[in-house]
Image (cartoon, rainbow, N blue to C red):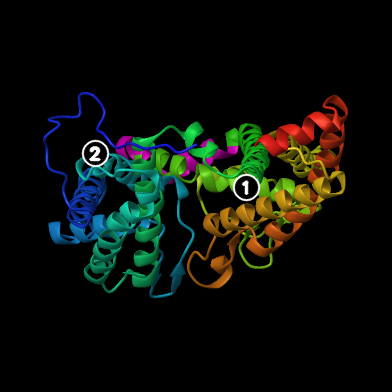
Amino acid sequence: MTLLADRPAAGDGDATRVPRPLGVAGLVAAIWSAGIGLVTVTLVTLIGWIAAPHQSLGAGLESVLRTALQFWLVSHHAGFALPDGRVGLLPIGLILIPGLVVFRAGEWLARLAEVPRLQRVGYAALAIACPYALLGGTLAQVAGNSVMRPSVWQSLLGCFLVAFVAGGAGVARRLTSWRQLLALLPERPRSLVVGTLAACAFLVMSGALLAAGSLAFHITRAQEIAEGLSPGIVGGLLLLLLQIAFVPNAVIWGMAYAVGPGFAVGGGTIVAPTGNFLGPMPSFPLLAAVPEPGPAPVASLVALAAPFLAGAVGGILTMRTAPTLNGEAAPGWGLVCGVCTGAVAAALAALSGGPFGDGRLAAVGPSPWQVGMITALEVGVAAAVAAWVTNFWLLRRTPPAAAAEEESFR
């Protein structure tokens, strides 16, 4: 099945309109996206500058604008260097700001340049991502000061990835629906994508439940930390927004806890189902969800079932999407689903943590390689068993002759 979008949808404008060159449309979309994102971040920074002591963001408007540029780069997950170390622990939630803007720019690009078919989505995504990354690298050069120096290479990479993924998704969404886009994949890759997404979604949901439950249990301590900061009304609102931006980090840390390796809040610390070893904690209300030092409660061991249940879900959906007549191959595809899930978990773990200055907080968050390896093992074993059972059950329901005829017809 081939899906084309050779003609603009009804209501998109004059049918005689001349399509813009892809490179020109991509440059305009990149500038528009960066401009909208910078204006949004600058407004928030100005509100904070007006409400807070001016020395915190700079003495003049130039310092405020430079701070806004730095926040915009941080929203693309670009770290920065301080006089006493490097900061790589950044809120994942801020990626939604440029991501949504670039997604809309991708839809606009597909309409303006009249991208004819899905095979051109990659070129359209590059048309946005390349100038967008160059803008990010240029802004990183001018946004630095004596206190905070954004990483140029991380700015280039972060801006490119955000624009390529979000812009490409916007172009693809303009041409077809998500369901039809998934249907374009070959049968076996499609089954692995479905199984991996289901397993990852189950793990993320488990992490969210753990983080939310722990925060609800320690809500009094979180309120005490917030009151001790005395942020005021506007400062309290900005603190709340910052905590919301860090919620995805907390969810991924909860996922790492459920998988087993847990996470660190500084060098020599660990928060895991086997026990909690902590030092002095930063005064941040969301960190109140971190359990107290000492042995982990027995109830927390229940969380260790999450990766095996996720593997069962992934293995079942992998085989239900595309059964195989070779029963011995089914466990292998379950293992592949587990390896893919481990790779995604490792990427999320790397995205959620990082250094926060020098010294004790130089290591914060889960270990990507530990989370990825153990997730691949736990999810892979469970997915292999579930895939074998599911495939066996499906073959029992469908006679081999009918299944072979159906597969040859496909």
Disc 1 designates what residue? 189
User: Against 239, is 275 above or below?
Assistant: below
Please provide percent x and percent y for residue 115. 28, 44
The magenta-colored residue range is 221-237
Please provide percent x and percent y for residue 43. 21, 44
- Assign the magenta stretch its main secondary structure: helix
User: For the image shown, how many numbered marks are present on the structure?
Assistant: 2
Earlier-in-chain disc, 2 versus 1: 2
Q: Residues within 10 Å of mark 2 (few under 14, many from 20)?
A: many
User: Against 5, is 24 above or below?
Assistant: below
Disc 2 designates what residue? 111
- Magenta-span inclusion, residue 231: yes
Quarter containing the C terminus: top right
Q: Badges 2 and 1: C-beta atoms under 8 Å apart? A: no
Q: Amino acid at mark 2?
A: Arg
Asked which secondary structure carries label 1, the reply is helix
User: Against 157, is 127 above or below?
Assistant: above
Which quarter of the picture shows residue 19? top left
Q: Work out whether residue 3 can be spotted.
A: yes
Nearer to the camera, 200 or 259: 200
Q: Amino acid at mark 1?
A: Pro
Please provide percent x and percent y for residue 311. 76, 42
Q: Work out whether residue 231 can be spotted.
A: no
- At 55% across and 72% down in the image, what residue appears? 359
Which quarter of the picture shows residue 62? bottom left
Nearer to the camera, 172 or 299: 172
Nearer to the camera, 147 or 90: 90
